[in-house]
Image: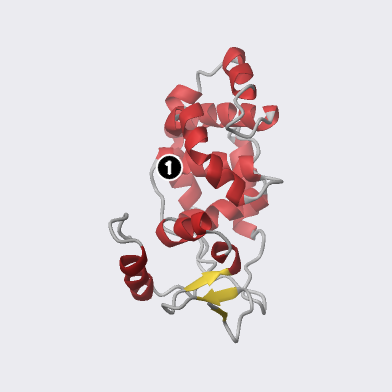
Amino acid sequence: MQKSPEYPNVVIDDHGVARPQWASTNRLLQDYFDTEWGRPVRDERGLFERLSLEGFQAGLSWLTILKKRPAFRQAFADFNPDVVADYNERDVEALMDNTEIVRNRRKIQAVIKNAQATISLREQGGLTELIWSYQPVTALVLDPNGNPPSQSSESAALAKQLKKHGFSFVGPTIIFAMFEAIGVVNSFPFRETSNLSNAYSADYAGGTPNI
């Protein structure tokens, strides 16, 4: 494994696959990057999950959230907005006692509130339409190390719009991280799909194919 001679934050493995530095420090992070991160997500439940997890991640590492993701899915009904929207104070207290998730009352309450807002938004086109309407028309400008910005004018505008619709824990930085994760922006233009597929076949035989 070696660093790119042009971009210090880009790491190239023995298969010639380029990954950002953060995705090369842990196998779970690498698997997430290789199979999910940056791939387009357009279904409501998938977007609600990503938005919820990005909110929980605020102030924590993404690795912490990934490790707890199965527990989050169980705790929040696989992030079904119709179910989560009906959670009450008793559910909140039960979640606060759940040691397998991040026990932050404000973040838990935000997920419930955001589930309710997601349902209300259906009358105006839905969460998917709103989020993807903020996809930028120009490519991101990376810094000399190959790092993207932490937010953008589009993430700030969507954060403002989401708050108007009743969402919380949706600041510009959280929204930009979601943009990266769900493919609204391409903040890692060094990835070669063909190389990734070859490496995946060699290293993860029997796993989920690349898309």
> Can you name the residue that lies furthest to the bottom here?
5
Q: What colouring style does the render use? A: secondary structure
- Judge left or right: residue 155 versus residue 188: right
Q: Is residue 130 visible?
A: yes
* Quadrant holding the C terminus: bottom left
| Residue 2, placed above or below residue 76 | below
Position of 122 compared to 148: left or right?
A: left
Question: Could you tell whether 83 is left or right of 92 in the image?
Answer: left
Is residue 106 shown above or below 9? above
**In the visual, does 66 lie left or right of 152?**
left
Q: Nearer the viewer, residue 65 or 166?
A: 65
Where does label 1 land, which residue?
46
Q: Position of residue 32 (x, y in %)?
A: 47, 55
| Residue at image coords 48%, 52% | 133
Disc 1 secondary structure class? helix
Q: Position of residue 9 (x, y in %)?
A: 62, 73
Camera-side residue: 204 or 44?
A: 204
- Give the number of callouts: 1
Residue at 68%, 31% in the rendered image = 104
Residue 13: x percent and y percent? 48, 76
Is 94 in front, or is 86?
94
Say which residue appears at 52% left-offset and 57% top-offset: 29
- Check disc 1 and give the amino acid type: Gly
Tell me if mark 1 has few (under 14), some (14-19) or many (20+) residues whose alpha carbon lies within 10 angstroms of its own.
some
Residue 183 seen from this side: no
Extreme residue in the top direction: 90
Q: Is residue 201 above or below residue 126?
A: below
Q: Position of residue 196 (x, y in %)?
A: 38, 70
Q: Residue furthest right?
A: 59
